[in-house]
Image (cartoon, rainbow, N blue to C red):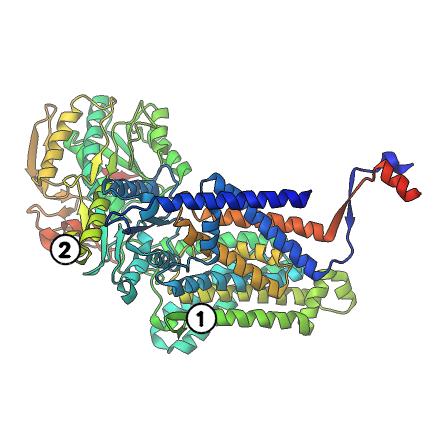
């Protein structure tokens, strides 16, 4: 009777899939994306094996200074990891903090302000602590305000955080381009406006391992990763976040103070992004108007691709960092490839992973042919 | 079925990969310099087809071809690098790691990353060369720029002659920046002085857009100059050809920048100040390749002009007044010979027949103050903090330093807006 209305293909929810199979699905998606990339590369006359080899070894093979490749990778990886972790906290609560860019900038600005104002006056350790505290506070408030407005006046947090990105960015441009007696951010020796270098005491310490020097901020990033895992899995606050994320009414019914949880979590999320900004400026030893390297945006992608899973975030942000940094290195071998290729490949991977995601949750059921149906009936 | 397809596809790709591999391995040459690697860090894409990065990329590849080098193999580029010290340092590490022996950075904000890299002991055998900067060391770090103001003076002559003919003394100038940067400021002044040498009544209206490149703003600024200030020639110091297109639309004339914009505006373009970056790149790469130990003596802080062929104006278009070619040639020869230069106490006055008179007098800014003394031995600039006009140290020798770094006034006959 229903046969005429039965569509050719239907989307049906799957039963729970085995985790290993899920991982396999994602790996296939990434491989498929690389394959699409390879087709594009071949059409450009570029050997994909050579490019991918350089990309995934971040150019260490044949490099005179291979250890510098790791240092370079970590400068990309550390801010991305912390930012993605921080954003995942808010996302877990279904609070759409896409203001990572702005919070990162506010953190970096605050840390640089402390460094430039108090630089010569105190030893390194308290100065660094103050810088990072300022970064967290400043960015935390910058993000926390959005949460406050959201719980008080039901403002849309997506729009608010998005717009505040531009406020922060143009504030940074303003201090970076305005030469005036008050502007202590700029170098006084250059006629053109250039950001001043931070005082030595504000530099992030590094641990020398042979020629390689390990930036301490990476260790902090790993610690933050572990910390967030326990925060979400093992603490009451972490549990509250996931309940609010699942259903605000359930949380209210359970007697949770939802507004407070939202503001607290958003403050924490933004503060951690700000900390990433503080780490970056301390490692880079100077501000710049392109300081974020888009981590606020890339972090959103990482958090999504990882399904907000803390350890998956570690893996995915490492993969994306290797792609971004590795592509820059690899592109030097081929005039036709520039760093935009990394973005393109990243987009293709995202596309395929989302597709894999779909097929993990759903399956397609095709309309049975008349013959099959007959067989079943019999 | 699907599996079979994907296996076939994978196999095909693998075969293609190896095929491509084989190709690249064959072509290695045996020339002594065939393994010399040049590194470059660009602010925009190496695949740009116009603009600042394109000009440099074109310069480097042209120079390398003249030196018989293979740009596909011997030129390593990291592009789209913003002015962020950390990102520039990473790009330097990448190029150094691949074995580049000279690394060029084309954007001003790369300055600190380059200065730091040059001091690193592991990079002692690499030469760092930074465009538009002011830092250097004695061994392996220089900066390079050019006397583009000389070319702007010549373009000013072409514009001045046009304004005489049209009996309209208003010239327009779309500028990325004004007195904030000596680079834009000296360019505006040189253009105005060139125009005034043939038309003493010429007034240059500067419309500042406060960004190095924004096509919409460049266009709007040019339109304002044409419609509000009645300008008859639109000159420019910004990235795109938009001001020239606006000039063509407004039925006025124009002087472009960076490339011969007659191509974009054939009915209105006169001539454009242009760079021959390859002149520097050839010198720098050749020296780095053959005598790197004496790079700083042989190349050093490079500031080439018309004499070296580093700057010039594009061929005069048919839109120019007929007497332009003769006059421009004469003035150009004076600069090439070192007989006369723009920012001195000698002002040129050129009559309709092309006779050049030299008048020795103080150069005045548009507030009436002397900025170059009448004897030519003192250069002045405004103190950015107090606003007072102060003599620049160094007497006569301060000239290049003022043009490159401290000039922050407009000469008489230039108005902002």
The x, y position of residue B341, in whole percent, is 12, 41
Instruction: Say which of B233 and A198 sits in front.
Output: A198
Circle number at residue B59: none
Q: For this view, does A157 lie left or right of residue B19?
A: right
Q: Are marks 1 and 2 on the same chain?
A: no
Rendered residue at 34%/71% (across/down): A200
Q: Chain of mark 2?
A: B
Q: For this view, does A156 lie left or right of residue A286?
A: right
Residue A202 visible from this viewpoint = yes
- Quadrant where the N terminus of chain A sits is top right
Q: CA distance from mark 1 to mark 2?
A: 44 Å
Residue A148 visible from this viewpoint = no
In this rendering, is residue B269 above or below A39? Answer: above
Q: Is the residue marked by circle 1 packed among few (<14), some (14-19), or many (20+) residues within 10 Å? A: many
Q: Chain of mark 1?
A: A
The x, y position of residue A375, in whole percent, is 89, 42
State the count of labels. Answer: 2
Assign a secondary structure to mark 1. Answer: helix
Q: Badge 1 is on which residue?
A: A131
Q: Badge 2 is on which residue?
A: B297
Q: Is the residue marked by circle 2 packed among few (<14), some (14-19), or many (20+) residues within 10 Å? A: few
The x, y position of residue B34, in whole percent, is 27, 48
Badge nearest the viewer, 1 or 2? 2
The x, y position of residue B386, in whole percent, is 24, 58
Assign a secondary structure to mark 2. Answer: helix
């Amino acid at each position: 009777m229903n046969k005429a209305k039965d569509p050719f293909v239907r989307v049906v929810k799957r039963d729970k899939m085995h985790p290993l199979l899920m991982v396999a699905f994602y790996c296939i998606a990434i491989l498929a994306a690389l394959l699409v990339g390879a087709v594009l590369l071949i059409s450009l006359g570029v050997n994909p094996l050579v490019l991918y080899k350089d990309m995934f070894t971040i150019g260490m093979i044949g490099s005179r200074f291979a250890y510098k490749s790791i240092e370079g990778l970590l400068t990309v990886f550390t801010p991305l990891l912390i930012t993605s972790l921080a954003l995942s906290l808010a996302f877990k609560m279904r609070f759409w903090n896409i203001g990572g860019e702005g919070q990162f900038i506010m953190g970096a600005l605050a840390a640089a302000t402390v460094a430039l104002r108090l630089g010569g006056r105190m030893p390194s350790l308290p100065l660094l602590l103050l810088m990072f505290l300022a970064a967290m506070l400043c960015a935390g408030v910058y993000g926390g305000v959005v949460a406050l407005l959201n719980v008080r006046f039901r403002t849309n947090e997506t729009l608010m955080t998005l717009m505040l990105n531009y406020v922060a960015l143009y504030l940074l441009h303003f201090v970076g381009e305005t030469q005036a007696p008050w502007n202590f951010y700029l170098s006084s020796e250059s006629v053109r406006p250039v950001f001043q270098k931070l005082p030595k005491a504000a530099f992030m310490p590094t641990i020398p391992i042979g020629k390689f020097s390990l930036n301490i901020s990476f260790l902090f990033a790993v610690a933050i990763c572990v910390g967030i895992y326990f925060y979400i899995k093992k603490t009451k606050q972490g549990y509250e976040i996931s309940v609010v994320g699942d259903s605000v009414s359930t949380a209210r019914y359970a007697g949770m103070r939802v507004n407070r949880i939202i503001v607290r979590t958003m403050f924490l999320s933004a503060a951690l992004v700000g900390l990433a900004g503080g780490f970056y400026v301390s490692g880079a030893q100077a501000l710049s108007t392109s300081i974020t390297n888009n981590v606020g945006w890339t972090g959103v992608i990482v958090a999504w691709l990882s399904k907000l899973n803390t350890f998956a975030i570690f893996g995915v942000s490492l993969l994306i960092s290797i792609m971004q940094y590795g592509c820059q290195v690899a592109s030097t071998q081929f005039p036709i490839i520039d760093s935009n290729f990394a973005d393109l490949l990243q987009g293709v991977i995202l596309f395929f992973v989302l597709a894999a995601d779909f097929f993990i949750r759903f399956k397609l059921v095709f309309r049975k042919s008349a013959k099959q149906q007959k067989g079943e009936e019999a | 079925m699907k599996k079979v397809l994907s296996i076939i596809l994978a196999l095909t790709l693998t075969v293609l990969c190896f095929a491509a591999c084989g190709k690249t391995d064959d072509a290695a040459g045996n020339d002594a310099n065939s393994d010399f690697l040049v590194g470059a860090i660009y602010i925009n894409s190496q695949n740009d087809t116009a603009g600042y990065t394109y000009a440099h990329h074109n310069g480097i590849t042209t120079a390398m071809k003249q030196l018989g080098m293979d740009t596909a193999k011997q030129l390593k580029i990291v592009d789209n690098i913003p002015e962020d010290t950390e990102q520039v340092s990473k790009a330097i590490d990448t190029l150094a790691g691949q074995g580049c022996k000279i690394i060029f950075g084309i954007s001003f904000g790369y300055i600190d990353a380059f200065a730091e890299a040059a001091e690193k002991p592991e990079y002692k055998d690499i030469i760092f060369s930074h465009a538009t900067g002011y830092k250097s060391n004695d061994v392996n770090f220089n900066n390079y720029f050019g006397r583009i103001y000389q070319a702007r003076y010549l373009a000013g002559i072409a514009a001045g002659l046009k304004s005489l003919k049209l009996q309209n003394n208003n010239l327009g100038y779309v500028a990325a920046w004004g007195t904030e940067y000596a680079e834009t400021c000296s360019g505006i002044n040189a253009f105005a002085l060139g125009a005034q040498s043939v038309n003493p009544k010429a007034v240059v209206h500067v419309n500042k857009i406060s960004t190095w490149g924004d096509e919409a703003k460049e266009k709007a600024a040019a339109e304002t100059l044409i419609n509000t200030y009645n300008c008859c020639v639109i000159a420019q110091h910004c990235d795109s050809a938009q001001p020239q297109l606006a000039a063509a639309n407004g039925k006025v004339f124009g002087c472009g920048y960076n490339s011969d914009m007659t191509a974009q505006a054939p009915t209105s373009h006169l001539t454009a100040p242009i760079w021959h970056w390859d002149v520097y790149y050839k010198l720098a790469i050749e020296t780095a390749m053959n005598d790197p130990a004496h790079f700083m003596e042989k190349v050093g802080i490079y500031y080439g002009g018309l004499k070296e062929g580093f700057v010039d104006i594009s061929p005069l278009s048919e839109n120019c007044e007929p007497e332009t070619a003769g006059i421009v040639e004469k003035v150009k020869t004076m600069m090439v010979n070192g007989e006369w230069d723009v920012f001195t106490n000698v002002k040129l006055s050129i009559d309709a027949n092309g006779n050049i008179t030299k008048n020795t007098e103080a150069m005045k800014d548009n507030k009436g103050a002397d900025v170059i003394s009448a004897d030519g031995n003192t250069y002045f600039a405004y103190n950015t903090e107090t606003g007072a006009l102060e003599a620049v140290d160094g007497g006569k020798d301060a000239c290049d330093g003022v043009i490159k770094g401290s000039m922050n006034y407009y000469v008489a006959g230039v108005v902002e807006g």
